[in-house]
Amino acid sequence: MTDSAHHADRPVKAAVFGTGSWGTAFGTVLADAGCEVTLWGRRPELAEAVNTTRTNPDYLPGIELPAGLRATTDPAEALDGADFAVLAVPSQTLRGNLAAWAPLLSADTVLVSLMKGVELGTTKRMSQVIEEVAGVPAERVAVVTGPNLAREIAQRLPAAAVVACRDGEVARRLQSACHTQYFRPYTNTDVVGCELGGAVKNVIGLAVGIADGMGLGDNAKGSLITRGLAETTRLGLAMGADPLTFSGLAGLGDLVATCSSPLSRNHTFGLNLGKGMTLEQTIAVTKQTAEGVKSCESVLDLARRHGVDMPITETVVGIVHDGKPPAVALKELMSRSAKPERR
Ligand SMILES: NC(=O)C1=CN([C@@H]2O[C@H](COP(=O)(O)OP(=O)(O)OC[C@H]3O[C@@H](n4cnc5c(N)ncnc54)[C@H](O)[C@@H]3O)[C@@H](O)[C@H]2O)C=CC1
Ligand SMILES: O=C(CO)COP(=O)(O)O
């Protein structure tokens, strides 16, 4: 654990791009595991605050960050000697961000996605965007996902996670670099399933939030979680994922955490809509990235391209983007034709 994050006779080095809640929290995990970590952020005043107060007052107020974590606004400084370049920016800005950083990457740096979204327009998963923009093979791109609400992790509360890479040995290296007493990563080689699990759970989290806001009860929540997982699995199967991935941490685990936590931005976004706020009002009170708001459209696009029925995702798109009143959307969802459970 703490001693395992060493590469031959030197500590493992990691650059983390994004000084938001998850970038900072995962940087904390890496530093607690013994890595030398440099966070990159856009704003000099936030980098300065991280370095001088050892806190991130904007995203994780009140939580002490480890000494092995420092911040900079210079991407070249962050990447200097990095074994891992960890990406934690919003999914829809990744392409533009990475285009600027890619020329600074060394030939053997492993790129790690922390993001849970699907690119609008291209319907690409984040690892695909990374491969394309950085010009690296799939074997050099890894994904970290699972039930990992950032604030809980930064408070060093226990959690398990999945580290996925097509190359199992790369996944094992990253697993050892981020394994601590409170953070337990498992490896997986099903990158497609792990990424889809993370992206679609945000959409289902919105749906459950809307239902909670409307006061529909816990049976509705259990039904949405289960049928949400069923439609995620259908899409995964059509895209070549291993269906067992969806009953693991990247699927069920993350879905349950997101749908039951007041810390989830997607759940909270849905809750506000369900309580009757307009989309504009909800966006105005949302200060952080709620990926499902944009990714519900790209997930639905993916589903249509693969000929997969995703009624809950379609309902969320109807409410969030087409202005359909939640009560009307609920009626439509409940009036769908009756069918066997396993289909
Ligand atoms: N917060 C959480 O609990 C978890 C978040 N994630 C995923 O991590 C990713 C990042 O989310 P968070 O850190 O939570 O979001 P956040 O909203 O807390 O932070 C986003 C970061 O990206 C930066 N950013 C925003 N627009 C940018 C741009 N145009 N260019 C460069 N940087 C920009 C912000 O300044 C901030 O540092 C998302 O895909 C999210 O789904 C995954 C697991 C847990
Ligand atoms: O992905 C997450 C927990 O695993 C965080 O969920 P939110 O993005 O909804 O806050």
Image (cartoon, helix red, strand yellow):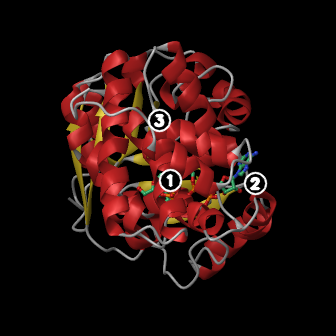
Element at label 2: loop
What residue sits 54% from the left and 61% below the top?
210
Is the residue indicated by label 2 positioned so its CB lies within 8 Å of ligand 1?
Answer: yes
Q: Is residue 62 above or below residue 231?
A: below
Residue at mark 1 to residue at mark 2: CA–CA distance: 32 Å
Question: Nearer the N terminus, badge 3 or badge 1?
Answer: 1
Residue 273, horizontal then vertical, whole percent: 65, 63
Q: Which residue is mark 3?
A: 311
Q: Residues within 10 Å of mark 2 (few under 14, many from 20)?
A: some
Q: Which residue is mark 2?
A: 42
Q: Amino acid at mark 2?
A: Arg
Element at label 1: helix
For this rendering, which residue is in front, 273 or 76?
Answer: 273
What residue sits 69% from the left and 22% below the top?
121
What residue sits 47% from the left and 30% below the top?
109
Residue 188, horizontal then vertical, whole percent: 23, 33
What residue sits 58% from the left and 81% below the top?
61
Q: Amino acid at mark 1?
A: Ala
Q: On residue 207, which mark appears?
A: 1
